Every structure is written in C-alpha cells, then in structure tokens.
C-alpha cells in the first residue's frame, strides 16, 4: 500500500470514529429520563375534579383516552396506567385517593383529594404522594364556578365510591395508550387546566383526620419495590415538585407554558351535569360500592 492509499485509509478510519462518537453522544442524550412527577399534572386533576358531577364521573374523566389527563406508566409496561378512585369519609370530611393500577393486587397511591365542609364553605386540598411528588406538595384550588360534585357530596344522591375496576378488568371506554414524550404531554394537558380557577400552593396543610382516613385504603406497592426511586433520591437538593416548577432550568416551568402550541388541545368546558358521551352505560353507581372493591 502506497502513501496515498494509507492516507485515504486513515481519513476513512477517522471519519468512522467521528460518526460512532456522534451516535454514542446522541444515544446518551435521548436516554435521559424526566421525573415521574411530571407525568400527572395535579392542576389538571383539580380542573377535572371541578368539572365532574360525582366520583364515578371523575374516575372516567381521569382515564378518558381522548383527553389523556395522565401520562403515568409506573410499571413501565409501555401503556399509561389505569387510575382508580377510592373514597372514605367521616362526618364532613371526604378523602379521595387516586391510585395507579400496576399488576394483579398491586397499586400505588398517586394523589389524594380532601374535601371538607365547614358551614356553607367547602375546601379542597389535593396532595401529591410524597414518594412521587416529594413531601408537602399541596394544591388548594379556588374554583371559578362551584363544582357540581360538591352538590353530590352533600346531597341526597351521595353514595360512597370505591372503584370496581382492577388489573385486567377495566371499563369498556378505557383503551390504554402509550405515554407521550413529556413536552407533548404538557402541551396537551395544559389545555385541560381551567384558567378561571386559582391554584394555591402556599400555606396548605392536611388535617390529621384526613391522613387517618386515607391510610385505610392506601397502597404503596411500587414504592416498596423501588425504595431507591423516591423523589429525594431522584432529585437531590429539591424538596418537592414545586422546586422543579420554580427552577429556571425546568423545561416545563408554568411561566413558560405560553410558548407551547395549544392548537391540538381541547378547549376548556365549564362544569356540567350532562352525562359525558364517552361514558359507558354499563357503569352503574351500584357497581362502585364496597361489594366490587379490591384492596
């Protein structure tokens, strides 16, 4: 091999090494994951709660394949988890627990909603599970329009709701979808956050009675299996998801949400008492009572 041939061969080798290095760098970047707390926006959950007429309707809206409120895939099976809704109550306090259905008899608490009545006022506190969102991540929504679900909680039609659905047995309307990249999820879910509401994150605290009630239905199977994936382990130096939201480098800071393209999202609709078109007639209220509930 003469000098010219050796020179050309060296150039080819350097070119191949450069291409491989670029591919390695690209792979490393694309493999970077985002925090799981970014896959269920609790302000969107608050908005959906305010639009629902009862807890059966609320569970249906959370799992509606058209709106895609959730992007959670905790069990990493390639499909968004079904979110079941459970309720316990005592006197004027109702505690609603949202859980991911992970496998047979395996569930993970995601968030709780405390509904408390004092006189003519009803207060709502939404708490993200500490394992997912970090400790003390609260939202106290102030609704622009009185939610119809308040009338259900305190009215004659109230019945305790315990989701009858579980692993492998889901309502007819539910068709699992693959989770989206976080920026696409946030672009979509932002269209479901009611801008007429206010979402207070300051000076919010659950009462001890609500915590006691919630323990009776709590499941933390994912947390038990993955102790190293707690919020503190995933986000060193941060207290809870609010620190992610306030971090100037956070990709999905709420102050930057105006930069997202919202043309593909569904416009917000005011709370209504009309039965949603996607809801199955086979889901009767009696189906969610304690007889079909699996703990």
Image (tube, helix red, strand yellow):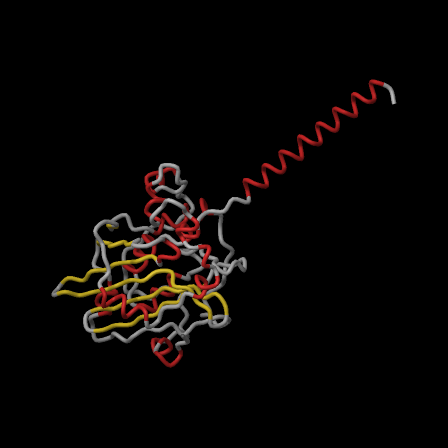
Q: Does residue 77 sit above or below 164 in this rendering?
A: above
Please give left or right for residue 26 compared with residue 126 in the image: right
Taking 117 as reference, is 2 above or below it?
Answer: above
Q: Which residue is more in the foreground, 194 or 29? A: 29
Q: Quadrant of residue 223?
A: bottom left
Q: Quadrant of residue 2?
A: top right
Q: Give percent across and percent down for residue 59.
A: 37, 65
> Residue 155: x percent and y percent?
20, 72
Find residue 33 and report its horizontal and vertical position in percent.
49, 47
Residue 90's place in the image compared with 78, above or below, is below
Closer to us: 95 or 283: 95
Residue 278 appears anywhere in the view: no
Residue 93: image location, x then y, percent: 22, 68
Q: Is residue 9 above or below residue 131?
A: above
- Residue at the image position 38 percent from the left and 60 percent from the top: 110
Residue 289's image quarter?
bottom left
**Is residue 168 visible in this depiction of the protein?**
yes
Residue found 39% across the figure and 55% down from its top: 132
The quadrant in which the C terminus is found is: bottom left
Q: Residue furthest bottom?
A: 291
Left or right of 162 in this view: 22: right
């Amino acid at each position: 091999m003469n000098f010219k041939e050796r020179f050309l061969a060296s150039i080819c080798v350097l070119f191949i090494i450069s291409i491989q290095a670029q591919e390695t760098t690209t792979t490393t970047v694309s493999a970077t994951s985002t925090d799981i707390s970014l896959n269920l926006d609790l302000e969107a959950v608050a908005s959906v709660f305010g639009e629902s007429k009862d807890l059966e309707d609320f569970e249906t809206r959370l799992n509606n394949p058209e709106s895609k409120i959730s992007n959670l895939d905790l069990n990493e099976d390639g499909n968004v988890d079904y979110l079941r809704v459970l309720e316990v109550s005592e006197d004027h306090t109702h505690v609603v627990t949202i859980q991911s259905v992970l496998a047979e008899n395996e569930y993970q608490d995601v968030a709780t909603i405390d509904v408390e009545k004092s006189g003519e006022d009803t207060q709502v506190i939404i708490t993200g599970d500490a394992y997912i969102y970090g400790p003390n991540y609260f939202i106290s929504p102030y609704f622009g329009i009185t939610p119809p679900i308040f009338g259900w909680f305190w009215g004659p039609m109230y019945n305790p709701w315990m989701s009858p659905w579980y692993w492998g047995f889901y309502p007819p309307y539910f068709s699992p979808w693959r989770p989206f990249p976080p920026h696409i999820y946030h672009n979509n879910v932002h269209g479901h956050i009611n801008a007429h509401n206010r979402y207070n994150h300051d000076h919010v605290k659950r009462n001890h009675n609500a915590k006691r009630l919630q323990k009776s239905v709590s499941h933390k199977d994912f947390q038990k299996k993955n102790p190293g994936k707690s919020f503190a382990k995933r986000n060193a130096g941060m207290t809870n998801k609010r620190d992610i939201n306030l971090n100037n480098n956070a990709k999905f800071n709420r102050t930057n949400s105006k930069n997202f393209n919202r043309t593909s999202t569904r416009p917000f609709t005011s709370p209504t008492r009309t039965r949603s078109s996607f809801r199955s007639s086979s889901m009767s209220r009696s189906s969610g009572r304690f007889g079909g509930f699996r703990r």
